[in-house]
Amino acid sequence: MNLISRPILDTIIKNLNYEEFTIITGPRQSGKTSILILLKQFLERNSSPTYFISLEDPEIIARLNSHPEELISLIPESDKKVFILIDEIQYLKDPTNFLKYNFDIYRERFKIICTGSSAFYIDRKFKDSLAGRKQILNLFTLSFEEFLVFKTGDNKLIAEINELNSREEYKSLQSKKLKQLLDEYLTFGGYPAVVLSENIERKKMLLKELSQSYIKRDILESGVRNEEKIFFLLKMLAAQTGSLLNLNQFSTTLQLSSTAINNYITTLRKTFHIHLVRPFYKNIKKELNKMPKIYFNDLGMRNILLGQFQDIGFRIDKGELIENYVFLQLRNRCNADDIKFWRTTDGNEVDFVVSTNFDKGFAIECKFNEKTFNPKKYSKFTNEYLNFPLRVKSYVNSSNSTSLFSI
């Protein structure tokens, strides 16, 4: 098995000496099991006792469900601390009790690193906060930088991205190649299996499988009864990427209560399909808008729901696609809670406002073509928020290249 490392693995390794157990969560097929396998290989190379448990095995589930103490009977004796890697921890009947029991009694003997398919399970099955005992890490589908490594097998293009990020005047000799790869990422997204497939039709087939089988599994396991309605809602959300989440509008269209729509949105968010960005404001009366904006956590998933795979230049939703891409880049670099948007009651809007410190940060307006950006249109924001300088990010800019390589 030829697995490619990802930055989250470095974070996990840096925290191996801490007692807290680690939960790696994220969408299905984002690479969580591969991270556990890579971690196992790393630990074994360093002569650290390691034991891998897959909770896809019903016999093992039955044993561990009978009593948390059964874990001891599965792992070999060792005079060194043992690292126990557990895949799909949410399949246990009571993962909270299992992890809490083994942490409180055996934390000096072993450390647990586990995966879980969704934040939904973390909320529903983890009955207390496990404060002081856990570290939760989110593994999303590949970022554009990770995508480049998966496609090329080296870090050379990452170095180009870093140069573009650190030096505004830097002109990359690899810009043509980067643009071709960006087009592929915008079209097919970052699911590892999709990225590694070279055949376009196979990419579409894999995305279709993900959108049907795996979303259906998420829906069924979350307890949602009306599968057809939530699928239709998901397609509506895909068509309204970057728009305000109007529960009443969806309620009317789907003939469901606002409460039901809100529950469906929570399920889709907790299973990592969508993300909601909240409004940024200073003057509450003029600026406060309670409705969040909708973005997808993977562009390929959004595109398969819409059935849109044509060249980006011919797409009617190219502006929304670029905006969603910029959100993903910001999400990978910043605390997601610090990413907001600005919109006034009279319709003035800035796509993203990111706080980097108290009352300080930056703002981004997204355009397909930089020529459509009119700075005067944003004067209310720039005059009011001097500590949040506004810049434009576009697919096409004045030098006929793209500013999306550096966010």
Image: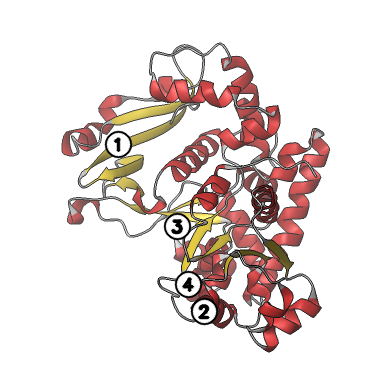
Q: Is residue 118 visible?
A: yes
Asked where in the image residue 316 lies, by quadrant, the reply is: top right
Residue at figure coordinates x 39%, y 23% from the top left: 166
**Please, what secondary structure does the residue beneath circle 2 have?**
helix
Res 245 label: 3
Residue that label 1 marks:
362
Amino acid type at mark 3: Leu
Residue that label 4 marks:
258
Q: Is residue 349 left or right of residue 329?
A: left
The residue positioned farthest toward the bottom in the image shown: 66
**Residue 327, horizontal then vertical, whole percent:** 46, 42
Res 100 label: 2
Which of pointers 1 and 3 lies earlier in the amino acid sequence?
3
Q: Is residue 114 visible?
A: no
Residue at figure coordinates x 47%, y 25% from the top left: 162
- Tags 4 and 3 in contact by the CB under 8 Å rule? no
- How far apart in space, not on screen, are marks 4 and 2 (Cα)? 37 Å
Which of pointers 1 and 4 lies earlier in the amino acid sequence?
4
- How far apart in space, not on screen, are marks 4 and 3 (Cα)? 12 Å
**Please, what secondary structure does the residue beneath circle 3 have?**
loop
**Please, what secondary structure does the residue beneath circle 4 have?**
helix
